[in-house]
């Protein structure tokens, strides 16, 4: 159940709608490669906006929803950063011109917002009726965490899926882009441009992202309002983050470790919650397991901050160490 006033939720949706329209459909539609200054300004604006929004939630609804929002936003934001690896690979595989990448990201993020909204509504309805689904969510997150920490996560490498391969066989698709157009004329015949394939690829990939992120956020809060706003703030400014970190993503070597700790922790938390509200007949004769402790919200936030912050600091230190080695090698080669 939502703990925030209805009037506040309506006002929030109105303001976020303005943010999304401006970020994705006005700024995002201008075909250009954003400068570092522009990227930093946009990212800083949305980060500060998220921090302020959490403070407003604290004022109007109390500390618990606010801490849940901060926990969810940080988790979703970190997962979004990790997902940028896939966006980089997709853009490279389909040779999307740099001046069009901003537009492609705008469409992709819009698709992600719609899909996540649907998943949130469905997930909230399922959770209210079937608490045992926490067992599935928890197990899924633990498996995902293990894949991340062992380096076997499929998201790190893009493979063209069956839908895209089938389309290539039945549709006339040219190898050349024609601006933002989906259809073009070539030698008197109409062809689909690669932009169609890029959009479909981004869309189907976003479905997989939703499968990763939605169980994670439901492990931190059951409030659909907090779940949705956490996702929106995590996606806003993502296209600027893409251009800012595009060349640095491979240097964030410990980010998967931090994410694996967060997802593993949330997975265990979900299973503990499922046990404490158990109704499955083959577990404890269908009764809740009373000895399972409740994980406080502040502890979830602490684990997320330490895991993600620690992985970021460790990655920076590792990057500086590699830079020093490279400089020393250059000096040695020069001598």
Image: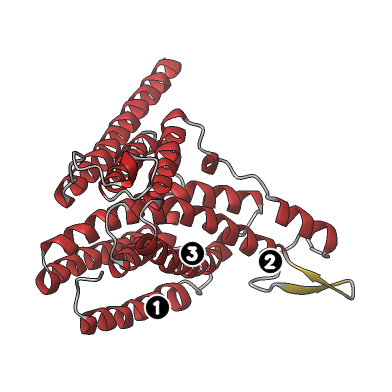
Asked if residue 230 can be seen in this view, the reply is yes
- Circle 1 is placed at which residue position? 22
Residue 197 spot, x, y in % from top left: 68, 61
Q: From mark 3 to mark 1, how far is it between C-alphas?
A: 17 Å
Task: Identify the image quadrant of the N terminus.
Answer: bottom left
- Circle 2 is placed at which residue position? 196
Residues at marks 2 and 3 touching, judged by CB atoms closer than 8 Å = no
Residue 301: assigned label: none
Instruction: Determine whether the residue tagged by mark 2 lies in a helix, strand or loop.
Output: helix
Q: Earlier in the sequence, mark 2 or mark 3?
A: 3
Left or right of residue 270: residue 55? left
Quadrant of res 333: top left
* Identity of the residue drawn at 45% across and 73% down: 24
The outermost residue toward the front is 285
- Circle 3 is placed at which residue position? 112
Residues at marks 3 and 1 touching, judged by CB atoms closer than 8 Å = no
Is residue 73 or residue 132 the one in the foreground?
132
């Amino acid at each position: 159940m939502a703990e925030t006033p209805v009037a506040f939720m309506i006002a929030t949706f109105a303001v976020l709608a303005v943010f999304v329209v401006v970020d994705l459909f006005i700024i995002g539609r201008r075909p250009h490669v954003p400068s570092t200054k522009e990227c930093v300004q946009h990212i800083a604006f949305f980060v500060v906006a998220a921090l302020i929004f959490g403070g407003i939630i604290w004022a109007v609804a109390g500390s618990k929803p606010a801490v849940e929002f901060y926990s969810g936003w940080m988790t979703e934001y970190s997962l979004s950063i990790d997902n940028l690896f896939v966006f980089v690979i997709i853009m490279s595989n389909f040779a999307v011109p740099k001046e069009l990448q901003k537009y492609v990201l705008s469409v992709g993020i819009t698709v992600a917002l719609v899909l996540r909204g649907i998943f949130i509504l469905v997930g909230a309805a399922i959770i209210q009726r079937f608490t045992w689904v926490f067992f599935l969510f928890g197990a899924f997150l633990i498996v995902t965490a293990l894949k991340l920490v062992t380096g076997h996560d499929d998201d790190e490498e893009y493979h063209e899926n069956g839908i895209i391969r089938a389309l290539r066989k039945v549709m006339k698709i040219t190898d050349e882009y024609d601006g933002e157009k989906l259809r073009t004329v070539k030698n008197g015949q109409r062809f689909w441009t690669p932009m169609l394939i890029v959009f479909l690829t981004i869309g189907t990939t976003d479905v997989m992202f939703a499968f990763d992120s939605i169980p994670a956020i439901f492990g931190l809060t059951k409030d659909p309002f907090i779940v949705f706003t956490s996702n929106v703030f995590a996606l806003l400014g993502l296209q600027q983050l893409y251009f800012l970190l595009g060349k640095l993503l491979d240097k964030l070597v410990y980010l998967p470790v931090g994410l694996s700790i967060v997802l593993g922790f949330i997975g265990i938390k979900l299973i503990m919650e499922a046990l404490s509200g158990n109704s499955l007949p083959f577990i404890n004769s269908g009764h809740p397991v009373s000895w399972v402790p409740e994980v406080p919200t502040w502890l979830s936030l602490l684990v997320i901050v330490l895991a993600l912050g620690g992985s970021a600091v460790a990655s920076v230190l590792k990057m500086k160490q590699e830079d020093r080695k490279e400089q020393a090698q250059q000096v040695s080669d020069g001598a």
